[in-house]
Image: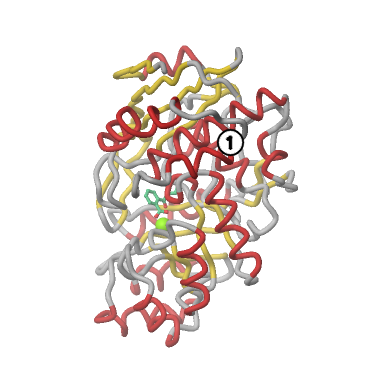
Amino acid sequence: MKIEQIELREVQMPLISFFETSFGRTTLRRVILVRVFGEGLVGYGESTAPEGPFYNHESTATAWHVLQDFVVPRVFAAEISHPREVAPLLRPIRGHNMAKAAVETAIWDLYARLQGKPLHQLLGGQRKTLDCGVSIGIQESPAKLLDKIEKELLAGYQRIKMKIKPGWDVAVVREVRRRFPEILLMCDANSAYSLADLDRLKALDDFDLLMIEQPLAWNDILDHVQLQKVLRTPICLDESILDGEDARKAIDAGACRIVNIKLGRVGGYTEALRVHDVCQDRRIPVWCGGMLETGIGRAHNVALSTLANFRLPGDVSASKRYFRQDLIEPEVEVDPQGRIHVLPDAGIGFRPHLERIEQVTVRTRSLRP
Ligand code: OSB
Ligand code: MG
């Protein structure tokens, strides 16, 4: 595959309403889109790095720096015949997985387009429809949260994830459960607790939750082992799993019974497939997480979610939940049963809306070998 040019482009996309987690509130997404040009076609990728280093180490600005100064030069310096070769090429760069994934996923898209095949097919994905859940942030009041949940259930979503933090947890979850006794419900703490909060975390066992996502530190495995020993509710790890080896260690140690896979967090498809397979071998289900992606990242999440071991509803939801207008055509839509229908077109399957992308671009950098 001859790669002739790589373009970085920062776009700014206001969210329809703020998204709040235990680490802060997002109102504007600052995303880096990557275009990889080769052999007459273009592949698209998206850096899911958040605006500031509060989910993990990365931010929009660090991703731009690492892409421009380290990731892209390494790609230009190599001969690439298959996208599987990209991740090993980037291995010497420690961390910065979201920056790496932006280019890695774009090269997978380009390769699939050059083959004239859908990306999900190249990955070995079989699913034609995906079960969808939603992630709902911390709200100004429990009443607002109940309203939001009701609206998403009416739209068909199959599973509700609510963000929690100390002070917005047991009492609120109790209210949600009282109002919606039968729904698939889970919590995501984004590392807001420690083992000192054991009683509070144990209290969540009363609400028949599908799982609790990342209750303890973003870089911890061992404390999660202690916690899982005393919780009935399955723990799902997000922040703590950066590669297949992390997944193996966490599962074999008993730190979790479910794994959330995010393309950005693990550095792209090659490692996402590895995490998927490590989990599958150990009969641990996975699901696809989200980082408030625009349509480009969303389309990649759809492709990934077609793999067999994505057995639980993911945070892969409709474009219109986050953005007034998304950057792809068609937008990602969810049917009244809460399912996404996978498109058969080449590459990521959705067409980038170039004029709209141009309108929201705040800086561009074109790089050549
Ligand atoms: O932990 O899953 C998370 C959004 C930003 C940062 C971290 C997380 C999230 C979400 C949103 O939960 C998922 C989505 O994109 O819908
Ligand atoms: Mg999470």
Colour style of the rendered protein structure: secondary structure
Q: Position of residue 339 (x, y in %)?
A: 66, 46
Determine whether, in the image, residue 308 is placed left or right of residue 256: right
Quarter containing the C terminus: top left
Local secondary structure at mark 1: helix
Residue at screen point 44% across, 25% down: 76
Left or right: where does residue 340 sit relative to residue 57?
right
Q: Relative to 208, is 358 above or below?
A: above
Check the image and name the residue furthest to the bottom: 230
Judging by the rendered image, the residue that carries numbered circle 1 is: 83
Q: Residue 279's x, y, as percent?
A: 59, 65
Observer-nearest of 110 and 140: 110
Apparent side of residue 145 relative to residue 39 in the rendered image (left or right): left
Q: Residue at x 51, y 54 (%)?
A: 261
- Indicate the quadrant containing the N terminus: top left, top right, bottom left or bottom right: top right
Report whether residue 178 is seen: no
Q: Which residue appears at 48% of the width and 27% of the height?
A: 326
State ligand 2's quadrant.
bottom left
Residue 171's spot in the image, x, y percent? 33, 73
